[in-house]
Amino acid sequence: MCATGSLPLAARVIAQRLPALATMANGLRRCPWHTLVTAALFVTCGLRAEDAVPDAEKLKFFEQKVRPLLIDNCLKCHNEKKQKANLRMETLAGFLKGGDTGPAIVPGKPAESLLVKAVSYKDEDLFMPPKDKLTGDGGKMAAEDIATLTEWVQMGAPWTEGSSLAGEHKRRHITEADKKFWSFVPVKDAPPPAVTDAWVKNDIDKFIFAKLKAEEIAPSPEAEKAALIRRATYDLHGLPPTPEEVDAFVADTSPDAYEKLVDRLLASPRYGERWGRHWLDLVRFAESDGFKQDAFRPNAWPYRDYVIKAFNDDKPYDRFVTEQLAGDEIAPDDPDVLVATSYLRQSMYEYNQRDVPKQWSEYLNDITDVTGDVFLGLGMGCARCHDHKFDPILQSDYFQLQAFFSGILPRNDMVLATPKQKEEHAAKMKIWEEKTADIRAEIAAIEKPFLDRVAKPALSKFPPETREMIEKPADKRSPYECQIAELAYRQVTEEQRQIDGKIKGADREKWTAAKRKLAEFDDVKPKPLPPAFIATDVGPVGPPAIIPGDKKKRTFEPGFLTILGAEVPQISALPNSTGRRTALAKWITRPDNPLAARVMVNRIWQYHFGRGIASNTSDFGKLGEKPTHPELLDYLAANFVKNGWSIKKIHRLMMTSATYRQSGVQPTPAVAKLKDPDNRWLWRMTTRRLDAEQIRDAMLAVSGELSLDAGGPSVDFIAPRRGVFTKALRNTRDPFNEAFDGADGITTTPSRSTTTTPTQSLLLINGGWPLQRAENFAARLRNMKVKDNEQLVTQAYRLAFGRMPDAAERAAALKFLTRKSSETAPGAEPGGVMLSDKIVTEAMPHRGSQAIHVRNGNPEDMLRAADTPALPSEDFTVEAVVQLDSIYDDAKVRVIASQWSGNQAHTGWSFGVTSEKSKHEPRNLILQLVGKESYEVIPSDLRVELNKTFYLAVSVKLADTSAAGITFFLRDLTDPDAPLRTANVPHKTTGGYHSKLPLTIGGRDGHGWDGLIDEVRLSKAALTKEQILLNDPDLKTNVVADWRFDENPGVLKDSAGYQPDLTRGGPGKPQPPKANDNFLIDFCHVLLNANEFLYVE
Amino acid sequence: MSGLKQAGIPHHELPATRRDFLAKAGAGFGSLALTYLLGGKTLSADEAAAAVNPLAPKKGHYAGKAKSVIFLFMEGGPSALDTFDPKPKLNELAGKPLPGSFGPVITAMGEYGAPLMASKRTWKQHGQSGIWVSDWLPHTASVIDDIAVIRSCIADGINHSGGVCQMNTGSVLAGRPSLGSWVTYGLGSENQNLPAFVVMQDNPTQVINGTRNWGAGFMPAVYQGTRLQNGPDPIPNLMTPKNVGDERQKAKLDFLNDMNRKHMATHDQSELDARILSYELAFRMQAEAPGVVDLEKETEATKDLYGMNDKVTSEFGRMCLMSRRLVERGVRFVQLYSGAGSKWDAHSGLEKNHSGLCASMDKPIAGLIKDLKSRGLLDSTLVVWGGEFGRTPMSEKGDGRDHNPYGFTMWMAGGGVKGGQVIGETDEIGLHAVKDRLHVHDIHATILHLLGVDHARLTYMHKGRPERATINEGEIYKKISG
């Protein structure tokens, strides 16, 4: 509910408290208004000292000081249409008559005047003007304004006779409060808060830290280096860092490694390609007309390249602004500057719009809007039709700004060349012209009647006023008429251009012959100079701006915003230009313009941090959010100007702050999340989704296809060049642009949305283009000639995510790559060993729990777990509950568990039972242990019996090479009274036995179990008798994995802590099998769909 | 989150994610937040989807009869003078120049000097209401009592681009969200497994201005329309690529899901959650959408009703039937283009052009109305018919008509519209609307009103301005409901 809703009640209360006033009001209400005025004046007469003030002075005081205050603060709710509390305040009579609670003022008696009481905010039942919850407008007036009103009442409420404020509330007046609004006050170059904290790295951090401290939120520590280089590279280049770049940065331990990284990134041409794109978003750059025809603009790209180069060259921002607004005025002969005025050509344009004046007015509106948005951060659009309702922008401000542009003419007849190039070209042209004069005359003569025939109906399509302008001799046209006539006539020329099909009969033969003759001189004809897609002024005199359909027919000359002082522009006309735009650029980039620098540094901040310090980067008005750190914004703005408007210096300042370098993950985020869930105080780095071009470019970069060819005419979407170089058509957007909130090139895009839609997911997972990238990514990995799947996975992670996979990720990936699938394409290399469909499980006799059945060393029945650092590399214990069905005829080992290739040259261990021809006798429980320099078989001389359930274990204390070093345990579980047997054996290996091969259960290469295995428990310590499975089945300490093969938690799941599940299949060869090609593509495709790929921390 | 926000509230933004939602909702917000805060249980998939999904169904400002809209867009501009707005005077004056009394107009092709052209149609009154319909539309005439014919529409665009743009977005200039986007923004969708806003066209030629006709303009892309194509892959990228196959696809998605969940465990940011859900949504869409476009389950009688068994009407009939199936499943806004690529643009040869196009859409549209009615869906489905403008009484090239945005006919049926009424009038020759003029903004305001949305209160903050579908204009034509 609006705050004013409470007024009647409040007013009633006051009326009760002030019966005298109420009575008086009732009495007065019966008087005609002129009597009232007289009475009021009479009341004041002779009573006050202010009598001494002459009436003229009083009226001036009223007009200059009081009237605007009343209009701004009172009239919205107390006017001819709307009378809160039955009070009207547009006339003195209204004040005196008052409302429900009596007269609003008692002239000469501020103390008795409700108005004074209300605006003073003394009586909480009567706070006026109320605060508008919607807009934040209103609220208690400034002290001096209250004083003004009080003084006015004191003076006896002077009022210009017969004057009414009726209707004036619709007009905006610039008030003192407006002038004090944060974005309009001068930039304060104040020193940062005095903060000392180890976290602080530069001045930015002092501002951020001070605020965080006040909020009692802790900032986050610095991100890990891999995350930091990824963030910085995406930010500055829009691309992921290469694995080599990550390695180099991680390896660089010099104290300024990070600063060097920022400098390297800023110096690369990739930087301009990324940051140029931000600017192109703002100026709604596109390469088509946007209407029915949506004609391609083949000459739009040089502006794109200009913008990229400007960023790469660190062109001072004030110069950058000036060149775009007025490049033609400041350096008409420099093609590198002239091209910048392509800024004036970015509007959509309908080539055959018959209502030329209307389209021209829309064109100018568009430039006005975008100029307000981009350079001033002010949404001017509202003021096109009326004074801005919320911001101090008058309709006249809008059209005065437009007047800087109202003299322009879009040019299609200019070239981007130096005077010298033009001269040379003209000289060659002259030769060609001389040689071809006769032929061309002949052609012209043939064409003339046809051209005339086309022109007449083409002209007749325009309304009479437009036709008149065209038909007027050029020197008689006003500048405005020149513009309209020129633009309209282009439609005629366009139709004439299609004359080819219209020349018929004998004429055609003659015409074709002449054309052929002309073509013979083509080798003398110089190549055309690059056409310029720019605008200049129509001449040294430009028309004023007008409001279409304005009944008052007002005209507007160039003028600066009233709120910023309304100083009269100093415009000096040039020979061919009005000079207006130079004046505008000069004003925008004046060091004391409070908007330009603030707006630009705020944009830079936004692109680095995901949100501007003032979050609505193109709206520094009242409806935009106020800056979270206004002092910081000013500090940066001042710094920007002081440093010669260098954008790169601002990047460096921002990026070397601790604020920017924060991790995206706050170790203890509870408080911060509660107090500041949106991260407005920047207690961590916000994780951000890549934008449309970044996703596209990153996919190409990761797949190894990205071409870094820079500049030149735009290419189709499918070309593997950076997104900034692909054609930007308005009516047909590319799929990534459309799905991932790209800029539409129609209106300015100050920040990209980041929506999350199923359409995006469908595009990424089913779309042909991403799938092709995955295929090429897979091919790239193949070509890296990696040793094995593990390396394949590692490289893939490095390329896609800029980091190594952890053990669990590697294991999951390996599992994915080598899984069994019915869809394995014929001829494709199968992933791992072919497996049957089911794991064979059985109940273990005498124990009742579920066991896996390994059938005579069948690799299909074996299980494996990828190596992780969790697996033992020092002391360890392996335990198992088993039943052995048979032993080998030869010397092979019935292996229970192992992490070894079987090759004595490879490190590892293997735990099992000997067979018939073993030199250690059959059915002997043994451990094979291979260190870096030793291979040994450690027999227990404890014998396992066939077809009986046994608990068996080996506990290894590496350092102790005495007999106490290794203990074997064995117990027959079929006999409740059977003893636990132990054996102690010495060993030689004291370390270095760890293998990176997967751990396998049920066998290793060529050496497999036969029978049941119920439970395998692996610990990274030499367990004591008290700790072993038989005595402490729920032991947690040092237990790495406990595979029980039960339905719960799952046959392949571990009950202790080893995260990746077991997978099926034996150990394979020392080099694990090659991944199935399709699965590798799928794996790559998943990486390109992953959140870690699409988001940067 | 019941009801829509009030006008003018800056930053009318939907919580983008579950966590945002919970953060913004605060403790007083009821069971959802409370459950979460107490940690008693995690959100169910539906709850989470509602919290992260900007397309979750929302209530209007007040109860509206219409729940869905089917907008039949005759692209290129059908002639009112030969369909719904008979002008005997025009036939009287045929061959003469436009009398000065009708005032000057700017036309696209500048044919103001051309003589007036008679309508060659035979006209009859139809139904209980006795509304005049020309012989080009016998089937539409048969359901005229369900239709409110608006003869007094006006628009600003004199060219197709501006006209189509305005009829879709309210402005002749590009950049604003289309009406379908506004409706989905305001009301969400009743079906989360299908796009909320669906567009179809009767031939592959690009509709003027391309996809931005159903674009979300300055709103997030989530509100943009989705073009439903004919064939087995109705939505781009809907189906698993053939060379991948279901098993691999499933393995990929499972693997992706594991990877994303692991990533989220360390990067607890809301959007990541939403993206995981978006894959789930995408695949529910993949499951449901093919069923919708599979018309084989419809009876022969139904197919006949829509003219699907006749070559002339089969394409538009298919689209109309599909529309019924979509609104039946809760899709919010369906737009069908007849004559995609300005085919109705009869600058010459009006007779041949319009007779063909009328025949192609007349029976299907009447079938749609009848079918919706018999299924009890017409009350909740607003059907809108029209083009970006009409055509001039003046001739062009002897046997055609130029663009006329100054007075043209549209019609509405169902969704709270009182059928069998004629609204507004054009002048004696059908050049200018003269009575009860309904500007495009008024038409949009009325459509929103019928859906229970107050056009003045449905706002979206853009660049510091509370934007409305009707650009701060538009009046609801309440009499349309009788």
Image: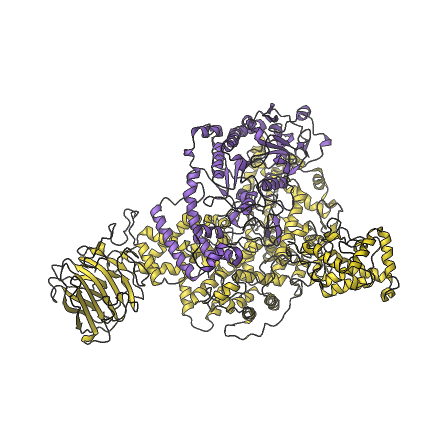
Q: Nearer the viewer, residue A844 or B121?
A: A844
Q: The chain shown in purple is which?
A: B
Write down the quadrant of residue A699 in the picture.
Answer: bottom left
The colour of chain A is: yellow
Please state, as top left, top right, bottom left or bottom right, where the C terminus of chain B lies in the image. Answer: top right
Depth check, front residue: B144 or B109 = B144
* Along the line of sight, the residue nearer the viewer: A972 or A53: A972
Q: Is residue B414 above or below residue A521?
A: above
Q: Is residue A764 above or below residue A799?
A: above
Residue A96: tell me if it is visible: no
> Residue A206, image x and y in percent?
55, 71
Residue A532 coordinates in the image, percent (x, y): 59, 51
Question: Is residue A1000 toward the left or the right of residue B186 in the image?
Answer: left
Number of marks: 0
Inspect this view and state whether residue A540 appears: yes
Against A959, is A793 above or below?
A: above
Horizontal side of A719 relative to B395 (left or right) equals left
Residue A708 in picture, x, y percent from top left: 46, 56
A849 or B152: nearer the viewer: A849
Residue drawn at x 46%, y 48% is: A759
**Which coloring applies here?**
by chain
**Residue at coordinates 74% horizontally, 48% vertically from top-left?**
A81
Please state the horizontal and vertical placement of residue A640, each as a whole percent of the image.
Answer: 60, 66
Residue occupying the far right of the picture: A46
Q: Where, by quadrant of the figure, is residue A932 drawn?
A: bottom left
- Left or right of A93, for residue A667: left
- Determine which quarter of the picture holds residue B412: top right
